[in-house]
Amino acid sequence: MCGRFSLSKSKEEVAKRFQVKVAPDYRPRYNVAPMQLMSVITCQQPNEVQQFRWGLVPSWSLDTSTAANLINARAETLTTKIPFKHCLKDQRCLIPADGFYEWKKEGKAKVPYRFTLTSDDIFAFAGLYDVWENQDTGEQLFTFTIITTEPNALLKDIHDRMPVILRKDLERLWIADKLTDSQMQSLLKPYDADSMASYKAHRAVNSVQNDTPECIQAAPTIYPGETFSLFG
């Protein structure tokens, strides 16, 4: 699954990379967590960045309780799972990012790793979105989910899934007006492992309360206040 990611680049960099309008209140994010607002580019409004909440709430839901369980959607079952299949026609989106995190158990600890492109460039996850309306207030809630696939060689020892990262030249195809089933399946593949990099991330990312540049830093050999032990 993908449960945490980052978009630490500036508003200007995002606008230039995707050729889109970015709202003035955009701010870099270092530790995006489910249920938080994040930048998306939709097939309905492909020329601007909007802020949707992470965790899909289908339009037909009675309430918003599904969100926590629908932060990801498996590529292999998109066409059969009810919460996702109705979004495939015209509710696809790009989720800009520049890294994501997974945790690996090392001894008694779960150690965060950050995954990026070797170029450290911005990229886009493939996603789906939906709009839910509160029947009592009429308020609309815009939400999204990140599509996942099997892991590539870089990730397989840490997790059995990875988010779908779209090739730059194919991003606009994902949010095109018409997308055939065969085109969709060809896009939802593991990203080339040779074009990705990873490193142990700073433990600050362990807490969703932290959203600072420290989260994307490499973990130090020894954290402040700790002592090194040959027998650790």
Image (cartoon, rainbow, N blue to C red):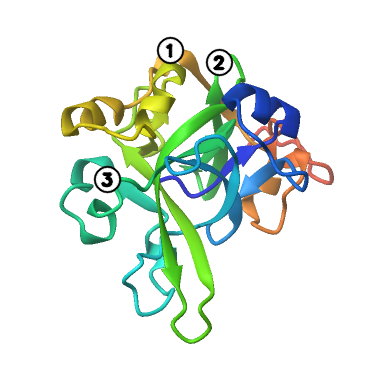
Q: Which mark is residue 118?
A: 2
Q: Nearer the viewer, residue 70 or 112?
A: 70
Give me the C-alpha separation between circle 2 and circle 3: 33 Å
| Quarter of the figure with residue 161 | top left
- Nearer to us of marks 2 and 3 is 3
2 or 1: tag closer to the N-terminus: 2
The local secondary structure at tag 3 comes to: loop
Image marks 3 and 1: residues in contact by CB distance under 8 Å: no
Query: Residue at horizontal 43%, vertical 26%?
Result: 171
Left/right placement of residue 142 relative to residue 127 reads right
Whether residue 109 sits left or right of residue 145 in the image: it is: right
CA–CA distance in space, label 3 to label 1: 32 Å
Amino acid on which the number 3 mark rests in the picture: Lys
Residue shown at 64%/46% (left/top)? 31
Point out residue 115 in the picture as x, y percentages from the top left corner: 53, 30
Contact, mark 2 vs mark 1 (Cβ under 8 Å): yes
Is residue 110 visible in the rendered image? The answer is yes
Q: Amino acid at mark 1?
A: Asp
- The image's mark for residue 194 is 1
Q: Separation of disc 2 and disc 1 at Cα?
A: 8 Å
Residue 89: numbered disc: 3
Label 3: few (<14), some (14–19) or many (≥20) C-alpha neighbours in 10 Å: some
Mark 3 vs mark 1: in front? 3
- Depth check: give the residue in front, 222 or 217: 217
The residue at 38%/63% (across/down) is 69
Decide: few, some or many residues near mark 2? Use Cα within 10 Å; few <14, some 14-19, many ≥20.
few
Could you tell which of marks 3 and 1 lies nearer the N-terminus?
3
**Which residue corresponds to the image point at 49% horizontal and 31% vertical from the top-left?**
124
| Residue 156 seen by the camera | no
